Image (cartoon, helix red, strand yellow):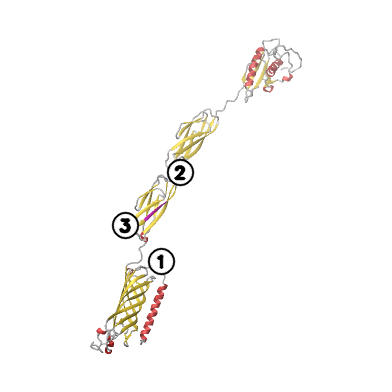
Amino acid sequence: MKFNLRNLKIAAICAGMFLCVAAASSQVKTPAVTYPTPLSKVDVYGGYGAFLPISSYINNQQFDSIYNPNATVSVTDYFTRRFGLQIEGGYFSASSLRGSYGQCVNGACSDRDQTLYTAEAGPIFRFPHGRFVPFVHVLAGGAKVRGPYLQPLHWGYGLTGGGGVDYILPWFHNMLAVRPIQADVQYEHVDHGVAPVVSQLNYYGTNDITNVKLSGGLVLRFGDMQPPPAVMEDCNASPMSVYPGEPIVVTGAPSNLNPKKKVVYSWTTTGGQITGSDVTANISTVGLAPGTYTISGKVVQGNKPWEQASCSGNFTVKPYDPPTISCSADPSTVLAGTPVAITAAGMSPQNRSLTYSYTSTGGQITGSGAHVSLSTASVPGGPITVTCNVVDDLGKTATATTTVTVTVPAAPAPTTSNLCSVSFTRDRKRPVRVDNEGKACLDDIALTLQRQADAKLVIIGKNSPDEKGIAAAERSANVRLYLTQEKGIDPARIDVRQGAVSDRSVDNVLVPAGATFADAGTTMVDTSAIHQHGQPYGRPGAPVAHRHRKHHQQ
């Protein structure tokens, strides 16, 4: 079997190109989610090329390389991003030798031109990388061959393996690509039968053709394997924070929807009652306990994953705020006995019903509601704290206080008072002795001193002009003796004085605690220096003693 050296070189070059394309394709890494250019669903290729036989001898005749008008056409349908099914047809025809006028030479005519038809199908794998799309394919099918000499057209089978690369043009909406090279190694087997006689050997025989087919051309790209942008959904609740019973509106914000398809919305929530099945829905929070809840939404346009989307958001139910209260008094300072107006100003942020109550550290509160009165009757002076209380229908409370200052009129300063006087005019023989009538007066004075234990008594003895001053001193001393000895009055509570000359008597002045005795016209008497003459006061059966002692006469 003879091999054409030129064809061997071409075959080697084509094989090398094929191996390079295959190796490059196997190393291509494509993105998993996004694609720089659309991936076509169907490719239609049309190209022009060359038929380069490597081994094609039959009866010592070999096919020639064919560069005459030829065509390679394929239609590829991709099932995934990389895998598809390809149907390819090829046509190559060489012209027979002709004379100067087109006549057949050596018996060859156009119906004896070397011709190769292929109709094959098989899997194809592509490896997109940006705008470059390398591919490899393996095809099998029928091959119809005429020649290389006088063998007529006859069907056999063929195999093709190879690859190439497309470049997607950035124009025409990515629908056109250039295929600069497609290199395939082909094998065709055609049995023309056995010659019945030796003279017909050029019409029969078996064609086993191994060749390289090179082609290049344009690719029309249709469809898009890349799924449309996935549907997306966002949702939010408004307002996001409410009190129990306040409504909430949830709104979905879908994107990448297909306007030609129906949209179905659905909503769920972990709290409250939700109504609505459109892009918006309403949530009732009546009776919902305070806390954080989740709202979930879903939008569906089909069964495919990119035709569905979900979203979620949160809303918060706040507990009711407690009421607030302020408390005031008018006036805030009063005299005891003056009523005071107490005003409580309560407020509920959620307008709950309010109930008021009051307490105080003094006085008496009358009335109800936000306005009451504080009575200060019989209240001692000083501050009174009034507490205003408010409670709403949920039992939440608040308190505030105010102070009322009660003043009491100053008590008048205590003054001295004149008590009964003791007369010494009835007994001329004993002019300084306290008689029974005098004792009756002194008994009343003793009772007064016993009732007012903090009071003092001032005894003022007086004498008439015809008497010596010692008589006044003795009279005062005798009254003192009666009160201390007979009535048990503490001597320290009694002051003895001598008054101006006027008559024979003793005046008694009560000096309460805090009062001051005006001592004008009187002098203190030293009772220890007085010499008594007879009995100081009448005592039945008591002896009369006379002692003489010098003293200073006033």
Q: Nearer the viewer, residue 478 or 472?
A: 478
Image x and y of residue 501, in percent: 67, 15
Image x and y of residue 19, in percent: 40, 78
Magenta region: which residues?
Answer: 294-298
Number of labelled discs?
A: 3
**Amino acid type, callout 2:** Asp
Residue receiving disc 1 = 32
**Amino acid type, callout 1:** Ala
Label 3 SS: loop
Label 2 SS: loop
The image shows residue 42, relative to residue 460, as above or below, that is below
Q: Residues within 10 Å of mark 1 (few under 14, many from 20)?
A: few
Residue receiving disc 3 = 262
The answer to whether one can see residue 83 in this image is: yes
Relative placement, left or right, of 255 versus 414 is left
**Amino acid type, callout 3:** Lys
Q: CA distance from mark 1 to mark 2?
A: 54 Å
Is 306 in the magenta?
no
